[in-house]
Image (cartoon, rainbow, N blue to C red):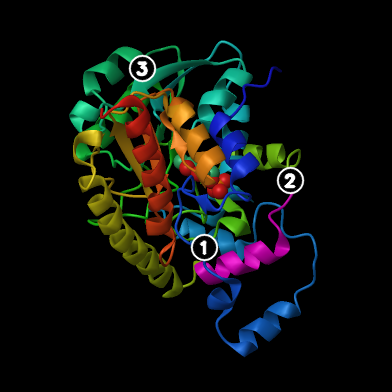
């Protein structure tokens, strides 16, 4: 199998812990362990856990909390994984045979884009369109999905645009999957990280060949737990568990227990409320910064996720711009090139305190230098 590099992850993994300002992250400021455990009694109790192997598919307690979030789902329909990225790997490993077509919403996190190709499949892109408010064109979907489609993969809310599918698009996706008998693979890791408006409705529950991918890294601000999950039909979940035997065996014992706390009654809503307040505060700050740059940037306000996808009018390639920021200002952003979309950059806005404004100050320095070098855009 030939490796298709996952450019954005390579870029982030290589640099995110050595830069002064990391604006490449798409989640909110992670919760400290102490805040999750709260009181001394819980800390003490937690310290007594053995560092043991955990239940391979996730403890019944955790699977039951997760199942409770999906209409009619049971714990047998849940497999707990190491991050939603592992859930995506297992699902595509199982589904994609050489020659299979996968209709894939783009831009996207791009893990599925690489994996489909590595498993010998063919990606048929379903592009979100800026002129449609980062929605796809339903007529285009109709032309892409057919008898040869093995899976239709969407990311909703979307990374990098922060867009949420409208109800008409949601229906169109479900109808297209049902009509073609394709698997529907829905990455919903940003559900619950809505800056405003209602919680994004899951694609779960309307069509039997559906696999939902999700986890605690984004809306729940717990990326370090590496807890993800896949929800699907019981027999498929059983099969994916058998694939899991070849990857990481089990979620870590401690993460499974901490995830139980995060998803317990009351706590879950508190964590999501924290996420929303960070997003509201920081997006306000970012929007002001964008507005202060006149016509240099345009964007459609993101609905969910700690990310803002900006189109820029500077005469510089997005990877070159990101390299300059990295090398000269120790600031990491994601270039649009990594989504196949030069002319855009993705800025993460989930940090606490003054981090975001300081980091944007670094970006400003480069923008001023570019303007001086090349003349105003
Ligand atoms: C859309 C999307 N899916 C999946 C992931 C993987 O997240 P994790 O493995 O931490 O759950 C990310 C990470 O940025 C993402 O943006």
Task: Give the SS element for disc 2.
Answer: loop
Residue holding disc 3: 145
Residue holding disc 2: 248
Residue holding disc 1: 30
Q: Position of residue 74 (x, y in %)?
A: 50, 55
Q: How packed is label 1: few (under 14 Cα within 10 Å), some, or many (20 or more)? A: some
Task: Indicate which label's residue lies in the foreground, 3 or 1.
Answer: 1
Is most of the magenta stretch helix, strand or loop? helix
Q: Earlier in the sequence, mark 1 or mark 2?
A: 1
Query: Depth check: 364 or 35 in front?
Result: 364
Quadrant assignment, res 14:
top right
Q: How packed is label 3: few (under 14 Cα within 10 Å), some, or many (20 or more)? A: many
Task: Indicate which label's residue lies in the foreground, 3 or 2.
Answer: 2
**From what the image shows, is residue 265 above or below residue 41?**
above
Report the magenta residues as a range. Answer: 248-262
- As drawn, the label of residue 121 is none
Q: How packed is label 2: few (under 14 Cα within 10 Å), some, or many (20 or more)? A: few
**Going 50% across and 34% down the picture, which residue do you hit?**
324
**Going 22% across and 48% down the picture, which residue do you hit?**
292
């Amino acid at each position: 199998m030939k490796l298709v590099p996952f450019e954005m992850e390579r870029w982030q993994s290589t640099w995110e812990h050595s830069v002064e300002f990391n604006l490449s992250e798409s989640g909110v400021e992670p919760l400290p362990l102490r805040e999750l455990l709260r009181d001394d009694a819980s800390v003490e109790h937690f310290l007594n856990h053995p560092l043991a192997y955990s239940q391979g598919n996730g403890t019944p307690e955790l699977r039951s909390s997760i199942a409770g979030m999906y209409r009619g789902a049971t714990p047998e329909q849940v497999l707990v994984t190491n991050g939603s990225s592992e859930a995506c790997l297992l699902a595509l490993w199982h589904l994609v045979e050489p020659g299979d077509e996968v209709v894939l919403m783009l831009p996207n996190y791009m893990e599925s884009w690489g994996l489909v190709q590595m498993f010998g499949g063919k990606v048929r892109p379903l592009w979100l369109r800026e002129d449609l408010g980062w929605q796809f064109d339903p007529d285009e979907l109709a032309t892409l999905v057919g008898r040869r489609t093995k899976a239709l993969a969407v990311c909703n809310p979307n990374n990098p645009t922060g867009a949420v599918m409208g109800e008409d698009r949601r229906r169109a996706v479900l109808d297209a999957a049902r009509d073609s008998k394709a698997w529907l693979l829905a990455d919903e890791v940003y559900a619950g990280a809505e800056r405003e408006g209602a919680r994004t409705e899951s694609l779960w529950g309307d069509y039997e060949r559906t696999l939902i991918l999700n986890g605690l890294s984004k809306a729940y601000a717990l990326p370090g737990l590496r807890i993800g999950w896949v929800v699907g039909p019981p027999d498929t979940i059983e099969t994916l568990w058998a694939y899991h035997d070849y990857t990481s065996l089990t979620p870590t014992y401690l993460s499974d227990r901490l995830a139980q706390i995060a998803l317990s009654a009351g706590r879950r809503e508190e964590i999501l409320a924290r996420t929303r307040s960070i997003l509201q505060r920081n997006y306000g700050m970012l929007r002001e910064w964008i507005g202060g740059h006149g016509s240099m940037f345009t964007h459609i306000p993101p609905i969910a996720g700690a990310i803002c996808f900006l189109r820029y009018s500077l005469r510089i390639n997005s990877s070159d711009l990101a390299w300059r920021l990295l090398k000269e200002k120790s600031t990491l952003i994601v270039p649009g090139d990594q989504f196949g979309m030069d002319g855009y950059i993705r800025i993460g806005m989930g940090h606490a305190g003054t981090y975001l404004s300081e980091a944007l100050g670094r970006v400003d320095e480069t923008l001023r230098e570019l303007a001086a070098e090349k003349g105003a855009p």
